[in-house]
Amino acid sequence: MSSQSYILNGTVTDKSSNETLIGVNILIPSLKTGVVTNEYGFYALKIPQGEYRVLVSYLGYETIERNVQVSQDTKLNFSLNETSENLDEVVISSDIEKLSIKKPEMSVNKLSINTIQKLPVIFGEVDIVKSLLLLPGVSNAGEGSSGFNVRGGAVDQNLILLDEATIFNSSHLFGLFSVFNPDAIKDLSLYKGGIPAKYGGRVSSVLDIYQRDGNSRKFKAKGGIGVISSRLLAEGPIVQDKGSFLVGGRSSYAHLFLKLTDNENSAYFYDLNTKLTYRLDESNKLLFSGYFGRDVFNINKNFQNTYGNAVLNLRWNHVMTDDIFTNLSVIYSDYYYGLTLDFVGFNWDSGIKNLNLKYDFNHYLNDDLNLKYGLHNTYYEFNPGEIEPINEESGINYFKLTNKYALESAVYISAEHYITKNFSAEYGLRLSNFFRLGQNGLNTYQNGEALIYNEELDIYSEAEPTGSRVDKRSEILKSFTNLEPRLALAYSFNDNESIKASYNRMAQYLHLISNTSSPTPLDVWAPSGPFIEPQLLDQYAIGYFRNLHQDKYSLEIEGFYKKIKNRIDYINGANLIANNAIEQIILPGKARAYGLELLFRKNEGRFTGWLAYTLSKSEQRTPGRTARETGINNGHWYNSNYDKPHDLSITASYQLNKKWQFNANFAYQTGLATTYPVGQYEYESITIPVYGDRNSNRLPDYHRLDISANFVPKPNSGKRFKSSWNFGIYNVYNRNNAYSISFRENSDTGINEAVRLSLFGIIPSVTYNFEF
């Protein structure tokens, strides 16, 4: 065989829609080598001259074989047909969820949209974020809480990307639902550790979500009608086989029923997903995607709260050479928060905007070594808040908190390297820079100290500014530079068993100013600068991975330890609302988390599902700045707001026949850390509680069972119009899980009592789904 090597490359698509497919296996058995398609469906292999049999496999699709003669650089595209499994055959839910033994990738969870759509959820609304909570290492602050926590980290430490654009608030209706329309989503990955060098800016996790491109061969539509919301998505060709569109919308309407009872209150959301794709030629493709969402909360027309995200992204995919794939993105993101108080007479606006330029390269050097490198640059504008009177009768004067500006840039390079048959590595380096730019009215303080400690009273208080400085936007108030090495190793004992280890160093330059366990939309983002240092993470993980009984089962066991510097903490009694001098109420602290995760899956058969368990600890410590200061909690480690030592979830799905499928999930979690009063005293006839150490108590343990059934009336119908029903019961045994516990004096008996607040009991739901 000739020693001359050539590039074999191309894209893999769905034959019916021409949609590109992510993670498809391209295998050449005779060379014992292969590759998977990237996030844009592209692959490349460098192989010796010769004739080969190429296998293309992606479960849920028919495996195809093709013989190819390689005597020069060759482009070879594939189109795959979906399979229709018979019930007496093996049913496989999705290969993207199955374990990759030899790949140097760990601490990564992937769920297919088909799996997510089966899971029982509250009000029958399919929810991506709620589905992630059933995986090990992922939790949240309880029902009705925004966002999610990963391996003991805070909500603001998660980087959430939708088509590469940053989403700053992933929740609708204060946490009841997520902002992601499942009908519009193609692929999602949650990185909890072993995070590749192309990602940066957060220290806990990366949730990377890609929208579907749209069908470039025929028009299709799908949607659903539920108890409190409905959705509709349409897609089709702009130019046959070259261009496509996708547009989808959702809206809730439960508030309309309140109007029938003369109730003036309302709470609803709506959002819109859109994407345009056009292939210029074999080497160039343009993609334009967008998302717009809003939540509206209204009480008696006197209080109105409006918030949401808007993102736009223009991308250019370019095959620069046969072995180099590039993607250039220009991204705009805007998170807005608005509040109107008619009874006071003012409007409040705040938010964060950013403009991001990214240029990423995939370089396929050979079948053992792939490089990824690129540069990212993001400009931020922070609006902490602006108060404006509604009318002349308002007693409120115009007030504007100082806008802040910043520039974040990074360059990175990483390699996926198959060193031997059994040993592989993914290693890389990211160099990040953050520049806090000039602004109006930056406070100055004596000795640069914005916080004063009173040693006699053992309390912190705000320092009085000595003045303020005004700087041009082009000036740099402070800059930070960090090297962020990444390393992941995998050693496979055989095709079914391996051990893996990883190390991550990451920097986070943005901070969410919130002292609650579940952030609210009123919380604001603040950049690092003269008084706030960036958060710095070091995370270590090691794991054992095994496929069992010919991939019918899989087992993942991982241990992790992470520590974070410069985690913001707040002095007792800190006022965060409309505070123009955040530096006067914060102290730099430390955080750490460690634990063990287990994930056992049954991948095949009529009965599928998984068991996930996490044993972990999440703590925070804020010592004083000097030996004389006591800091927070006397400088001792204390439980973080999101510490949950035990977290268990069991998910199951059973395909009875072609018409009926039954699903269930059970969740159990240790109660959230909280602080209870340990005593009280009276002052001028007012009873004042005395609280114990921070987060030294816990809410009662949380648990619930959910069930659902999917019914397809005519599974064998050859008609274009198809429909199905989803019936669900959330919290089957009506567990009154505690959202919070408050203490009060009973007005009749005068005895102190604890009052539990529970948000949801048993909730039945029904959803009608259709497509044509």
Image (cartoon, grey):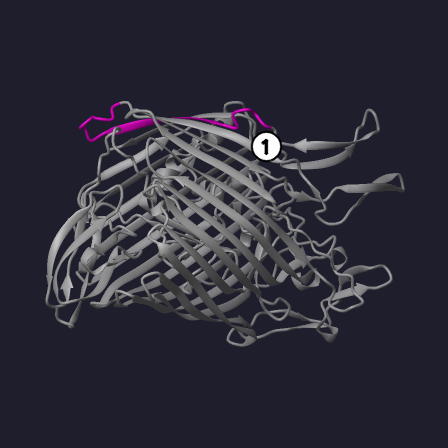
Find residue 467 and report its image quarter.
bottom right
Residue 468 at what x, y percent from top left?
67, 72
483 vs 579, left or right, is: left
Q: Which segment did they paint magenta?
A: 714-735
Res 470 → quadrant:
bottom right
65 and 411: which is toward the camera:
65
Answer few, some or many: residues within 10 Å of disc 1's Cα (few below 14, many 20 plus, some between 14 and 19): few
Furthest toward the front, the residue is 493
What residue sits 69% from the left and 44% below the top? 674
Count of all numbered marks drawn on residues in the image: 1
- The residue lying at 23 percent from left, 38 percent from top is 220
Residue 553: percent from the left, percent from the top? 38, 41
- Amino acid type at mark 1: Leu
**In the visual, does 514 lie left or right of 283?**
right
On the image, the x and y values in percent for residue 502 come to: 47, 61
Q: In which quadrant will I find the N terminus?
A: bottom left
- Of 319 and 264, nearer the camera is 319
Residue 136, relative to residue 445: is it above or below? above
* Residue visible at 89% across and 38% down in the picture: 685
Q: Is residue 715 magenta?
A: yes
Q: Nearer the viewer, residue 485 or 159?
A: 485
Residue that label 1 marks: 759
**Residue 277, can we see it?**
yes
